[in-house]
């Protein structure tokens, strides 16, 4: 169990210092995260981008002594070089800087220099919710718009594999739907039932998968009891698999806005996890995402 982001960072620190490559690194919040990651002993940085702009964004505080700059003015070319650094082993993790996400991913997955692995890319988010005893995770609220059944299988594999690397030996997985009844007119419920059958057949080892299951049951053993449902995960879910990008996006933003949750996120399915930080994220959120990426890639280092 990882109780909070402090514990997540501590676990990542146990892996030793990593090197991150940032494409289009002239972003003040990313540079602040670089400083914080270096001060914690989490990671050193290679900042790829326009040198003058990077130094200007660093301000009077400057960059950590361990950081180095690769001077490439064109932002797309900078992202491509950052990806190459990770692919070649000169860096461990790839981070998005001041560049549109689609342009960044195009460079990150370049056939010759990028991190394309042939699998489905999916977003993997962690939430620290005040009053809750542990971090909870969700996928996919950021990459796959309307996943078909096979894509949902890959999303689960990506996320469960990451949770194993985060130290959760048997994640409890909820395939979220509006209720627990399989309705042929509601594809999410049909898919959920099929995914549970896949799990029973051994498709998703070392985890517990339940679905279709509504959010109230997944998060409350009392709700399951009131509905007369038997569940091994109710009130103790580790991973929420959402039916669409809208559902995941709304769930995450509701948790952050009304439950005052904090979030970290990475993209799975490439040769290494990719950190796609949002411009709305503060430096602490970026550091937490870096820590999660370090852990999620632990078995490939």
Image (cartoon, helix red, strand yellow):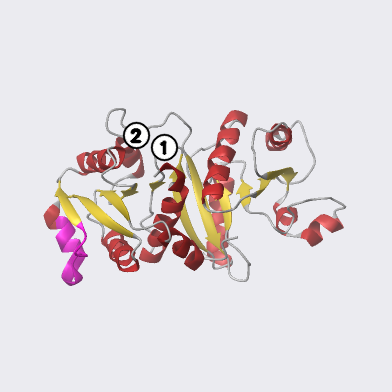
Residue shown at the point (17%, 53%) measured from the top left: 69
Vertical relation: 147 (above or below) 247:
above
Residue shown at the point (31%, 41%) measured from the top left: 104
Q: Which residue is mark 1?
A: 270
Q: Residues within 10 Å of mark 2 (few under 14, many from 20)?
A: some
Lower sequence index among marks 2 and 1: 2
Q: Which residues are magenta?
A: 53-67
The answer to whether residue 241 is left or right of residue 7 is right
Residue 13 percent location from the top left of the image: 41, 61
> Is residue 176 at least partly visible in the picture?
no
On residue 109, which mark appears? 2
Q: Quadrant of residue 252?
A: bottom right
Give the Cα distance between marks 2 and 1. 8 Å
Residue shown at the point (27%, 38%) measured from the top left: 88
On residue 193, which mark appears? none
Residue shown at the point (18%, 55%) measured from the top left: 68
The answer to whether residue 299 is left or right of residue 75 is right
> Is residue 8 at least partly visible in the picture?
yes
Are discs 2 and 1 less than 8 Å apart at CB? yes
Disc 1 is placed on an element classified as loop
The answer to whether residue 116 is left or right of residue 130 is left
Q: Nearer the viewer, residue 50 or 38?
A: 38
Is residue 276 one of those drawn in magenta?
no
Is residue 58 one of those drawn in magenta?
yes
- Majority secondary structure of the magenta segment? helix
Q: Nearer the viewer, mark 2 or mark 1?
A: 1
Residue 285 percent location from the top left of the image: 42, 62
Q: Quadrant of residue 245?
A: top right
């Amino acid at each position: 169990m990882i109780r909070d982001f402090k514990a997540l960072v501590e676990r990542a620190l146990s892996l030793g210092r990593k090197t991150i490559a940032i494409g289009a690194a002239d972003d003040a919040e990313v540079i602040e995260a670089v400083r914080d990651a270096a001060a914690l002993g989490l990671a050193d940085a290679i900042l790829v981008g326009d040198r003058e702009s990077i130094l200007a964004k660093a301000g009077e505080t400057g960059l950590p002594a361990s950081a180095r700059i690769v001077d490439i003015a064109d932002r797309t070319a900078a992202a491509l070089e950052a990806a190459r650094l990770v692919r070649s082993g000169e860096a461990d993790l790839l981070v998005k800087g001041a560049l549109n996400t689609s342009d960044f991913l195009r460079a990150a997955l370049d056939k010759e220099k990028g991190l394309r692995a042939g699998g489905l890319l999916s977003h993997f988010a962690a939430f620290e919710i005040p009053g809750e005893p542990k971090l909870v995770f969700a996928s996919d609220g950021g990459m796959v718009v309307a996943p078909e059944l096979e894509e949902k299988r890959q999303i689960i594999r990506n996320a469960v594999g990451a949770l194993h690397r985060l130290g959760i030996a048997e994640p409890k997985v909820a395939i979220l739907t509006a209720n627990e009844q399989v309705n042929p007119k509601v594809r999410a419920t049909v898919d959920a039932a099929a995914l549970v059958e896949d799990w029973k057949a051994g498709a998703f080892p070392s985890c517990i998968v339940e679905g279709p299951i509504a959010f109230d049951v997944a998060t409350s053993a009392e709700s399951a009891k009131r509905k007369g449902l038997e569940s091994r995960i109710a009130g103790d879910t580790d991973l929420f698999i959402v039916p669409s990008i809208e559902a995941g996006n709304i769930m995450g933003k509701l948790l952050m806005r009304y439950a005052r949750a904090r979030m970290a996120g990475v993209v799975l399915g490439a040769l290494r996890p990719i950190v796609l930080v949002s411009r709305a994220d503060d430096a602490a959120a970026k550091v937490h995402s870096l820590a999660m990426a370090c852990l999620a890639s632990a078995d490939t280092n």
